[in-house]
Amino acid sequence: MTLTHTGASNPPATAPSTGAAPNAPVHRTGGWIDDWRPEEPEFWESGGRQVARRNLVWSIFAEHLGFSVWLIWSVSSAFLVSMGFGYTPQQLFLLVALPNLVGSLLRLPYTFAVPKFGGRNWTMVSAGLLLVPTLGFAYAVQHPGTPYWAFCLIAATAGLGGGNFASSMANINFFYPAAKKGAALGLNAAGGNLGVSLIQLFLPVIVGGAGIFGLVKAADSGISLQRAAYVYAGLAVVATLAAYFFMDNLSSAKSKPREQLQVVKERQTWVMAFLYIGTFGSFIGYSAAMPLLIKLNFWVADPAPLGTGIYFAYYAFLGALVGSATRPLGGWLADRFGGARVTLAAFAAMIVFTLAVLWTLTQLTPNPDQSAGIAEDNRSWFPWFLAFFLCVFAATGIGNGSTYKMIPAIFRTQAERATPAGSAERAAALHAGTKKASAAIGVIGAVGAIGGFLIPIAFSSPWVDQPMEATKGAFVVFTGFYVVCAAVTWAVFVRRPHEAKAHVSLANAGI
């Protein structure tokens, strides 16, 4: 086998081949692997699987950390008022939304960075960059005089964590054979998505704000948000070192940005990007907004420290947890039933349960004056609100897994249809298709993540006088968008087209 892992060491210029391949690889320093053939069973079983799995594990860790930092404002913003920062709901929703906007914009350059610098090298850089938002966060929350614009700037830098997803997915896509990409990408994405849930679960505990359904009590000394920032800054250092010692770069993944940008000419790229707004955009947007939605509609601050009604810190993590857990299920279902059919079913479920969430909101009493009595009245509707919202999250997770299964399948199918089986042209086309899929992941991920910015902004709706009316209106718009997404999925990928249009639809290819 011609597989090497150089890590941070300096290997000899040559190494003996084990006989699994005719030629020994060209070994270089910097953690590069110069010969990578995952589609060959002997190569894969002789050590390729182990190398891919090791890179997957540490990729998940780094991406998980990136997601946690990306969403650190989703919970911490709800604590700012109790720390003496007098911000309005609209200002808090903007703080929640800004990291999502920056994270979505960074996904495209982060994707291109993998072929340019190497997956291992870029993981080190992207993990190290997380020190910027974490240390900036720690400084700002310790100074009550910090102006709002500074908070906005620091919140925007948390978007550095959002870019990690695109580079991580693009990198892992190169390591696995086509038959195993769905599961590998699903695990990688789910591990990252889980970072959203864990930051929302543990941040209230770390900062002394109570949590885990009341099993952890609030600290007598009050809220200390900087503690969470220091914890994640330390983990960023760990992720950087782990990538240095345990991950690899693949020479076969090298390509020029101009070559990668060719994927924007593919119609399927933009169709999938549109659908990903509905699945991942909803997941990340709802995850960011859920703590504030609970806080504004079901809880008031008095009496301190836990207030009256439903304490948001107890339940904020559940949505992201459910969405993360169902993402691998979406990939598995897509492998079995086809990604398009599963995606269509996911959008159908999102329509039904979003309408159910909207129904529960119509039963609530608006809480503009933060009245304890109103909060208690709304409490009885919270189980319904939470249950239906968690169903929405489950559907977004399944949709995330199924759409990402579709992306490499689309470009692989195109390559297979354009070349004869068993030919050198087929092998070259499949390799080019893998590069296209990795580039498409960046474009699709970038466009899809914009939904994470639009959803909190829709909930804040500064042009609407009553926050409750803004929330209801937002859910109406979201429902209509999911209907359009379902229609597009059916029209492009599911329905059986006329023979003359067979090349447009990929439903028969198992997508």
Image: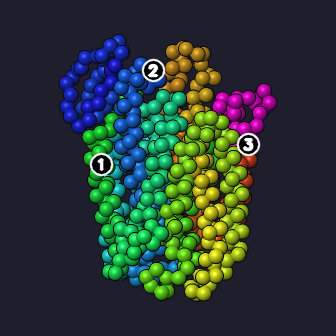
Depth check, mark 2 against mark 1: the one in front is 2
Circle 3: element type: helix
Depth check, mark 2 against mark 3: the one in front is 2
Q: Which residue has dot 1 on it? A: 240
Between the C-alphas of marks 2 and 3, the distance is: 35 Å
Instruction: Give how far across and how far down residue 41 sits, in percent.
Output: 45, 20
Q: Quadrant of residue 383?
A: bottom right
Instruction: Give how far across and how far down residue 56 sits, in percent.
Output: 40, 39
Residue in the foreground of this view, choosing between 208 and 250 = 208
Q: Name the residue: 44% across, 41% down.
A: 112
- Tell me the crowding category of disc 3: few under 14, some 14 to 19, or many 20 or more residues within 10 angstroms, Cα based: some
Q: Earlier in the sequence, mark 2 or mark 1?
A: 2
- Tell me the crowding category of disc 2: few under 14, some 14 to 19, or many 20 or more residues within 10 angstroms, Cα based: few
Quadrant including the C terminus: top right
Q: Which residue has dot 2 on it? A: 40
Quadrant including the N terminus: top left
Q: Earlier in the sequence, mark 1 or mark 3?
A: 1
Label 2 sits on what residue type? Glu
Residue range (magenta)? 489-511
Q: Name the residue: 65% across, 62% down.
A: 388
Label 1 sits on what residue type? Thr
Please say whether residue 270 is one of the residues in the magenta stretch.
no
Q: Name the residue: 45% across, 67% down.
A: 212
Question: Does residue 485 appear in the picture of this structure?
Answer: no
Between the C-alphas of marks 2 and 1, the distance is: 31 Å
Residue in the foreground of this view, choosing between 8 and 215 = 215
The disc placed on residue 490 is 3
Q: Name the residue: 50% across, 59% down.
A: 100
